[in-house]
Each structure stands twice: as C-alpha cells, then as structure tokens.
Amino acid sequence: MLCFGFAMFDRFAITNLSPFIMKDLDMSNAQLGQLMSVFAIAWAISGFFVSIVSDVTKNKKRLLMFIVILFSAFSFLTGLAKNFAMLIGIRFVMGLFEGPILPIAEAFSLAQSSERRRGLNMGLISTTSTGLIGNLLGPILLVALCEIFQWRITFFLTIIPGLIVAALIYKVLQEPDMTAVTGAAARDVKPSFKDSLIIFKNRNVRTSMAFGIFIMIWNVGTLTFAPVYLVSAKGFSPTEMSYIMAAAGLGAVVWGMLVPSLSDRFGRRPIVIIFSLLSVISPLGLMGANSGVVIAVILFIGWSGSGVFALHQGAIIGESVDTKYASTAMASAQMTGELGGCVVGVAIAGIIADAYGLHTTMAYTACCAAVAGFIAFAYYETAPLVLAKRKGAEQKTIISP
C-alpha cells in the first residue's frame, strides 16, 4: 500500500502543483496533457516488460525495492527542471521506474491472500493507497509545502518517503510463491516468455485491456485537468482547490475498500459495471456545480469508480490466468490503459481544453467512464465465493428430483 501510494503521490504531484508549474515554465494545457502522456508511455512499456522479467526470474522483492529507489531519485530531479523539455525528459525516465510497481505489488496480494479477502486486499493496494496518499494527502500536503517554500523544493522533499518505503520493502516483504494459487503441480513448470503470451487468449484479459483505456481517460484526465479547471474556470484559490480535490482522495480511500469487498461477495462483473457507470457524475459535478462543498460531495460519490481498478487490473485478471504469469497479465491491462488512455486519451483532453475550454474536457472524461461501464458487460465472473455458490446451486438442481 505504501509503495504504490507514494508512487501515485509522485505521479500526480505534477497535476496538483500544475497552477504553479505551468505559470513558472509558461506551459499550456496541451503541454500539461503531453507531460502526463509521455509519463504514461514510459509507465506502460516498462510495466509490461519488467513484469515479464519479474515472473520469469521469480525475484519480485528485490526488483521492487530498486525500482522504488530509482523513481524517488527522479522525483527529486523534477525540482531541477528549468524548462518544459527538461521536465518532460525527467518525468519520462521516472515513468520507466514507476510502471512495474502495481502489477508486481498486486502479485504479492494474489499469492498471499485468502479467497475471502483477495479483492479487498487488492483494493487496499491499488485504490485505497492511491486515494489516501496520492489524492487525499497529496493535494493538501503538496500545495501547503509549495506555498511555504516553492514547487521545486517540494519535489526535492519527495525523495524522503520513497527511501523509507524502499527500506520497508527490504525489511518486511516476503517473496511470493506464485504457484500457491495454481497448485503444487505447477511448481515443476518453469515460467518462460513464450508461454506467458498465452494470457492474450483469455477473454477477461482482452476485456480489461479495452476497459482500461476508457476508465484511465476518466481517472487520469479528470485528475490532470480538474485542479487547473477549479482555479482558472471556477475561481477557487489553490488552497481551496487542494481541499476539493482531496474529496476524490477520500472517496478512493472509502470506495477502494468497499467496492472490491462487495465484489468478493456479489461478483466482480456486476460491481465493475455499476461503479464504472456511477463514476460519470464526478466530472459532470465539476462542470455543473459552483459551490466547493457540493463539488467535493459529488467528487466523493463519483470517485467510487476508482474502486474498480483493483478488479479490472488485479483480481479479475489474476483469477483468469495461470498465476505464474499474473504480473504479466496485470501489466497488459495497465499497458493498454496507459497507452490508449493516458497517452492518447489525456493528450486529446489537453487539445480539447485549449480549443474548446476545460469544461468540454470534463464532458469528454464523463463519456469515457460511460463507455468503460458498457465494455464491462463482456467480463465473465471469476470471484471464487460467487462461483462456489453457483456450483453448489447447480449441484442441488441436479440432485433434486
């Protein structure tokens, strides 16, 4: 949780401090979108290929520790950027080191969680951590530090939590046994790159790859442009903006636990559909409301859609494929989400913002959330408890005269 939470804290530090950075470096909305897109390209590519390495070498703990140290170093270097070109280069390299974190971290949860808590634990890692550290504490803490010092010094300070997390990984984490879910028979089969590609034949993997594009446009597009929209279009101060955006973080904390937990009991598929469609109201609330309190409440409710990330990138895929290749499968959904959603989708959002206004960008991200909800109908159910109940009901039906 701490590992991925601080990764997202660093990733969205750019957007939370965008009113300060854009003014200092004379950046446009399109350039802000390009900055996030370039970061996402690096995140997607490295996430997929390094996850394959982690599956084949079976050395996830040490790899995760070094990745955290390196991305923290480049978060520090962000504060040295003198122009947009330098900033985008630093963030590209930083994205290379952050990309593999989630699929590797979720593999620990997949292998070491009971069936009753698998969805919940994955939600704690991917969504609750993001909400608490990246979206709730992040905007408040970063803007406060920026107003006391400046945005450059704020980035210098981000290396501290990263080094602490790296030390905790070394001290606390245990290397996961990725055959624990598949069974003892899989222990003698050595993972290989060629065999890992079979994951793409799975319908749930392909559905998550498509679903991830549109849900990422909603999530990252809204988080990227909402701060500058609240300041420039709605007239809130940077401090007021930080508290409004923190409501989304609070929503991610709550929904990040509740949504995956509900999926453990009622099924992955219906929960993903319901909460993806509900997420539409968050960007629409930003457009329609003018009261900071009202916008914050709508953001909190609408950010329930963030709870599906643990399912579409984690639990559903992890339960659909051979767990020896779980990190690779999870990274495949992350890759298409980052490339199609963050690279193309968020870049388009920035172009739309410059051409037609930031309110149009909010409408665009709302539409993408709706599309994601409809794509989710293609999933087949994987929740172990739900499948066990269905199997029991079928057996009773067969036995009954």
Image (cartoon, grey):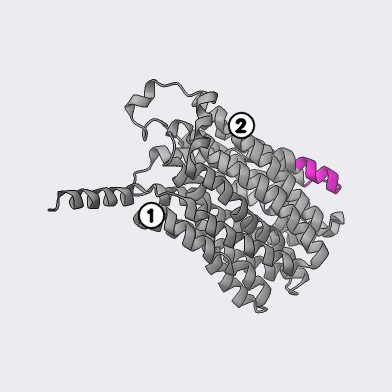
Residue in the image at 53% along x and 36% along y = 200
Looking at the image, residue 43 lies above or below residue 267: above
394 or 196, nearer to the observer: 394
Q: Is residue 168 within the magenta segment? A: no
Above or below, 30 relative to 50: below
Looking at the image, which is closer to me, 198 or 189?
A: 198
Q: Which region of the structure is painted magenta?
A: 79-90
* Residue 265 seen by the camera: yes
Residue 368 point in image, percent of width and height: 62, 59
Can residue 2 be seen from the camera position used here? no
Give residue 49's mark: 2
How crowded is the residue under tag 2: few (<14 C-alpha within 10 Å), some, or many (20+)? some
Instruction: Provide the secondary structure element on which disc 1 rests.
Output: loop
Q: Amino acid at mark 2?
A: Phe
| Amino acid residing under circle 1 | Gly
Q: Residue at x 47, y 43 (%)?
A: 317
Residue at x-position 43% and y-position 60%: 258
Instruction: Judge from the rendering whether residue 88 lies leftward or rightward of residue 16; answer left or right.
Output: right
Indicate the position of residue 180 as horizontal and vertical percent values.
36, 33
